[in-house]
Amino acid sequence: MTIRPKPPQRLFIPGPTDVLPEVLAAQTRPMMGHRSKEFEALFAKCEGQLKQLFYTESRVYIVASSGTGMHEAAIRNAVGGRVLNFVSGAFGRRWYDVSVGCAKEAIRVDVEWNTAVKASHVVEALEIALDDGPVDAVTVVHNETSTGVIAPVGEIAAAVRTVSPETLVLADAVSSFGGVKIPVDEWGVDLCLTSSQKALALPPGLAFAAVSDRLLERAAGISGRGWYFDFLNLEKSLVKNTTPATPAISLMNALSLQLDIIFEEGLEARFARHARCAGLTHEWALENGFALMAEAGYRSPTVTTVANNQGVDIADLNRFLGERDMKISNGYGVYKDKAFRIAHMGETDEGDMARLFVAINAYLGREE
Ligand SMILES: *Cc1c(COP(=O)(O)O)cnc(C)c1O
């Protein structure tokens, strides 16, 4: 195995995450024409590896946008009429806002923050909604970055299939993909989207989505799909290993190298590393008198939300950490200053976590 230079991680924020120097450098390769065999080979390689990472036999679209572009693509291609949006944090809300913005009939179902959306919530809301007619799709967030809660998407998708087999399941895995196993086909998820700058540890600017055959068939009957994000358009190009518009070639060079590095580490090893870093974060928080915000049993392997029950000045803590070239996140929205978030995703390992905890303990006056 190649020994890869890995400087200490600096960003313990849930995206963007630190990128390996050689992956950053891959972006400086000379340009190529995108209507070339060379680009088709790059596209085919990346798509093939992404399919393995999504555990899917279907297809993975690669677009130049942040993850939110794929939310818009998902809604425009999968929803003609009604969509049920489950909201238990900021990114569940994002699905709802995008649905409304695309002029769909969006039904928002709120679930308490810091708890997971579960199959029982989905069954209950879906049964009520079905009384008024069909529901084209449900949207869920796999890993709610604002709260640090991971949802049982496989169980949710199975429940949707039982209650309403025609309803598509759309999942946002922006902050879990690449850090947590997401077996898209086994779970029966019709669309699973992510972006480059979180657990994949790439610069921002690329979005990816695994899309099922039945979603594509549905899209054919839906008008107003737009053009840039039209899946039928993307599909025509994908079968020729290319994209309809000019791709982000430099980012795709970085993606290609990073995918090799991910497979070199091994998927199971990578997922296990994320789980260990989450475990260390939980231990550190509890040993130091903090509490965890996320519901037990549904704590994210990529980001931990810690209750700020000691009234720590988070901005001042971050100034202290900044002097040591590190950064954590404040609580999201109403949890600003009431909680703080520590991300442990991408390239972050146990040594990085230890360095962060030594620094936070020093700030808190608990030098060891
Ligand atoms: C960061 C994030 C998004 C937004 O992704 P962008 O790439 O910034 O558009 C959406 N959902 C979740 C869960 C996220 O963590």
Image: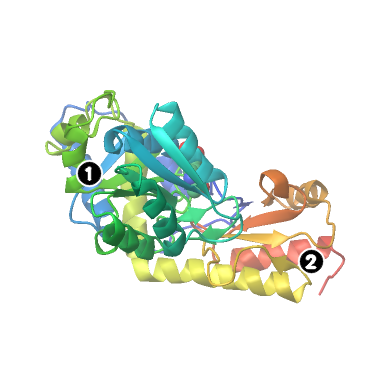
Q: Residue at label 2?
A: 361
Alpha carbon of mark 2 to alpha carbon of mark 1: how far? 50 Å
Q: Position of residue 154 (x, y in %)?
A: 35, 63
Note whether residue 357 is visible.
yes
Q: Nearer the viewer, residue 341 or 146?
A: 146
**Could you tell me which secondary element the residue under label 1 belongs to?**
helix
Q: Is 235 on the left or on the right of 339, as rendered?
A: left
Q: Position of residue 108 (x, y in %)?
A: 49, 42
Q: Quadrant of residue 158?
A: bottom left
* Residue drawn at point x = 23 percent, y = 34 percent: 231
Q: Position of residue 261 (x, y in %)?
A: 36, 57
Q: In this figure, which colouring scheme has been used for the structure?
A: rainbow
Q: Is 212 on the left or on the right of 197, as rendered?
A: left
Q: In this view, which residue lies farthest toward the right?
A: 365
Q: In this view, which residue lies farthest toward the front?
A: 131
Q: Residue at label 1?
A: 215
Residue type, numbered disc 1: Leu
Tell me if the residue at label 1 has its CB under 8 Å from ligand 1: no
